[in-house]
Image: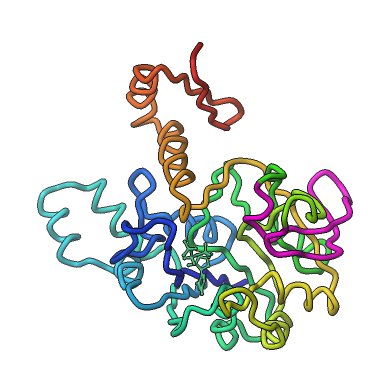
Amino acid sequence: MKAVIPAAGYGTRLLPATKSQPKEMLPVVDKPAIQYVIEEAVASGINDILVITGRGKRAIEDHFDRSFELESSLKDSEKHDYFEQIRSIADLADIHYIRQKELNGLGHAIYTAKKYVGSEPFVILLGDIIVNNGNPCTKSLIDLFNSNKAPVVGVERVSMEKVDRYGIVDAKKINETTYKIKGLIEKPSPNESPSNLAIFGRYVLTPDIFDCIEHTTPGKNGEIQLTDALNLYLKKTDLYAYEVSGDRYDIGSKIDWLKANIEIALKREDLAEELRQYLALLNLEPKVINDKVTVKEQK
Ligand code: UTP
């Protein structure tokens, strides 16, 4: 399958950090956020990827390109580990780029991938969402797509007060992780929300979605929402939701970006001990249980 990674958005919530650099390039520990996303696609068996960029996003292309000067300098100074790391980034996958010329929403961004996608099912991974639960999340969605022969949307449980930040699904439970979707609603208020299952940024869809995007009327701020297009899509196809467990971070939100840095560093052998000592100084006690990090305040 091919993957499409939308990464053209302004990143307004992280201003001023995103004034002249893409939010997808903000480091989480020592890697830009979008590298985690591309590594997840690759670990899910995908090596043909389209990144949707826009003005001010050139740093993304540079990051996944060769850097001959840097490579030769690292080689000359015998910094072999860094050399290998830098060299391997350019070989991660076959990455293509297209520009979304006007930022008219996520649905509009996905529509720019129509020609690239062609006639086969494809995967969407939002470029600012990191899922860090040990298994490549996209792989689980692809497996479900293959067994049900129907499109899949990744969802997670959020607290009821936060449903108004997400696209929410109305769905019937099939088994522990799978739901059949009956309807979708973008950013409902808690009292009108049909559930607390939130769409968070991973999808396996078929090219029929493009026709639905074409017929979707722009919503708030003139943006074409993917969730609205999915409601039209639902009239043509069965649609499933896969509930993902584990840590998920929206790098476009300040608090999630901070949490991602701390929690991912706590899972890193080279950083965990020192960071743990520092958190203890702040009177915080981090715990890693079943690969999930919680930071609890000490009494
Ligand atoms: P967000 O709504 O989180 O991104 O879109 P944003 O618009 O950059 O965020 P704020 O609200 O201004 O802070 C989710 C994903 O869709 C992409 C974004 O880059 C992000 O990866 N996106 C969004 C596009 O590619 N084009 C768009 O027109 C909108």
Q: Residue at x 42, y 57 (%)?
A: 35
Q: Residue at x 33, y 22 (%)?
A: 278
Was residue 178 drawn as part of the magenta stretch in this picture? Answer: yes
Was residue 181 drawn as part of the magenta stretch in this picture? Answer: yes
Q: Is residue 215 left or right of residue 24?
A: right
- Image quadrant occupied by the N terminus: bottom right
Please give the range of residues in magenta. Answer: 162-188
Colour scheme employed for the rendering of this structure:
rainbow
Nearest the camera: 220 or 237? 220
Most distant residue in the top direction: 299
Q: Is residue 144 left or right of residue 165?
A: right
Q: Is residue 85 above or below residue 95?
A: above
Q: Residue at x 54, y 55 (%)?
A: 43
Q: Is residue 151 above or below residue 287?
A: below
Tell me which corner region of the image, top left, top right, bottom left or bottom right, holds residue 246.
top right
Residue 263 screen position, x and y as percent: 47, 35
Residue 292 screen position, x and y as percent: 57, 32
Nearest the camera: 72 or 214? 214
Tell me which corner region of the image, top left, top right, bottom left or bottom right, holds residue 275.
top left
Residue 183 screen position, x and y as percent: 83, 65
Q: Residue at x 35, y 71 (%)?
A: 57
Nearest the camera: 254 or 206? 254
Tell me which corner region of the image, top left, top right, bottom left or bottom right, holds residue 179.
bottom right
How many labels sit on residues? Answer: 0
Residue 236 screen position, x and y as percent: 84, 79
Q: Is residue 292 left or right of residue 99?
A: right
